[in-house]
Image (spheres, rainbow, N blue to C red):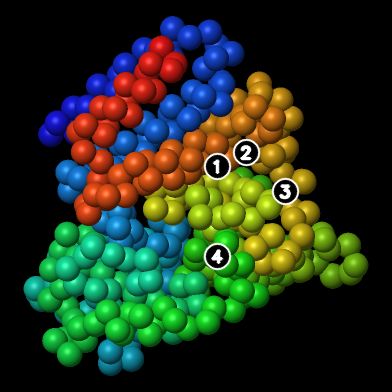
Amino acid sequence: MARVQAALLAIAICSSCGAELPAEDCDAPGLSLLQGNMQLISMKVSASTGDNLYGNPDCPCIGVDKLGGHVTGTMSDGKKVSYPADLGAHCEAWDAKITPGCPGKSWCEEKWCYVDPCTCKNVAVLPKPSNYLAKAEYQGRPLHFSYVTCGSKDSYSAADAKKTSKDIEKTCSVKVDSAKWGQEDCRCTGIAPKTGVAKVTMGGTLTDFPADTGGDCQAWEQDNDPACKAKGNSTPSYCSQKWCYVDPCKCKSATPPKTSSYLPNEKSQGKPVYFSYTTCGGSDSWTSGNKEACVNQKTNDDCGKLEKCAWTGKECLGKELVSVCKSDSEAASDTGAQESGTPSSKVIAALILSLLGTFC
């Protein structure tokens, strides 16, 4: 409770601080960093109080959340079942109203999500390979799920399905194909292959794309964008270029990733969805034609008009690249010694005071 109060107090004070600052200061990179730190604190506090929509921070859910459409899951008896397209992207009792046999079984109401077994740590029960999407992969390795990251008990898996640290180590030692899953310093963050439909926004209209769009490096528009399927030689240059979705906070490529116009309201681990052509060896001619792309805003004022963007002092980038990712990195360094991964009240208070002392 003390952490919640500290975070709420910080947000309230900083809101007042921002209101008293000149308009030009409120758009400054420093204030963006302040807002990023407040967002980070809010995320950490939520995790510490059990509000873990995206799982334990040490074993977060993966995939694209709030994605419209559907994906096909395969049951143990071979039966095909249609699930929401964002299956496993956040903690939810996904089986409760859909999976055959539910309700009625102990695991039907238990929450779970998909996770990366290679970065999942500090959990009592290790992740297990997916049954519903048995052929799907995440960053070149079999897709895994976890109940414990969502604070639930796994009564679904058979006793002999228990995984050991050696099993996980073997899974994670597999060499990853960078041509398919992106460069090592900027891996794709989608799940593929998947059968189904994903609803993406094109020109203000929802358009059907494959359910695994952006999951790995492919020229996704080639067979799905109406403009790319037109006959003749007048198809846009971006049609043949490969790209995928990436985590902006883990992508270290020379060309920063960009916010997705296909998925403007969807989330990945609570952050807006980003994409990259660079990590797939592709050339980005798509963004030049997108007037609302952050990188196409050449002034602080224009950049500030788009909620998803932030001004660095030199250029306009996705807000996460300017504030949240930097804040996350700094906070992780400060709290690295804590086993829980959640900042203590003292850490939160120190961060708040230092920020307020700088800007108020």
- CA gap between label 2 and label 1 equals 7 Å
Give the image location of residue 168, x and y in percent. Answer: 33, 80
* First reached walking from the N terminus: tag 3 or tag 4: 4
Q: Residue furthest right?
A: 233
Using the numbered discs, state the Cα–Cα distance from disc 2 to disc 4 in whole angstroms.
20 Å
Neighbor class of circle 3 (other Cα within 10 Å; few <14, some 14-19, many 20+) is some
Label 4: state its secondary structure: loop
Q: Nearer the viewer, residue 166 or 256?
A: 166
Mark 3 lies on residue = 287
Which quarter of the rendered picture does the N terminus lie within?
Answer: top left
Q: Is residue 3 above or below residue 175?
A: above
Residue 236 lies in what quarter of the image?
Answer: bottom right
**Location of residue 222 (image quadrant):** bottom right
Residue located beneath label 2 in the image: 317
Q: Residue at x 69, y 51 (%)?
A: 255
Q: Is 44 located above or below residue 131 in the figure? A: above
Q: Residue 322, position in %: x, y?
A: 55, 37
Task: Estimate the spatial distance between the alpha carbons at disc 3 and disc 1, rounded to whole Å.
Answer: 17 Å
Residue 227, located in which quarter of the rendered image?
A: bottom right
Q: Amino acid at mark 4?
A: Arg
Asked if marks 3 and 1 touch (Cβ < 8 Å), the reply is no
Of mark 3 and mark 2, the one earlier in the sequence is 3
Left or right: where does residue 322 sit relative to residue 349?
right
Q: Which amino acid type corresponds to the residue marked 1 in the rendered image? A: Leu
Marks 2 and 1 in Cβ contact (< 8 Å): yes
Mark pair 3, 4: CA separation: 20 Å
Residue at numbered disc 1? 321
- Rounded to the nearest whole Å, what is the CA distance between mark 4 and mark 1? 16 Å
Q: Mark 4 or mark 2, which is nearer the start of the sequence?
A: 4
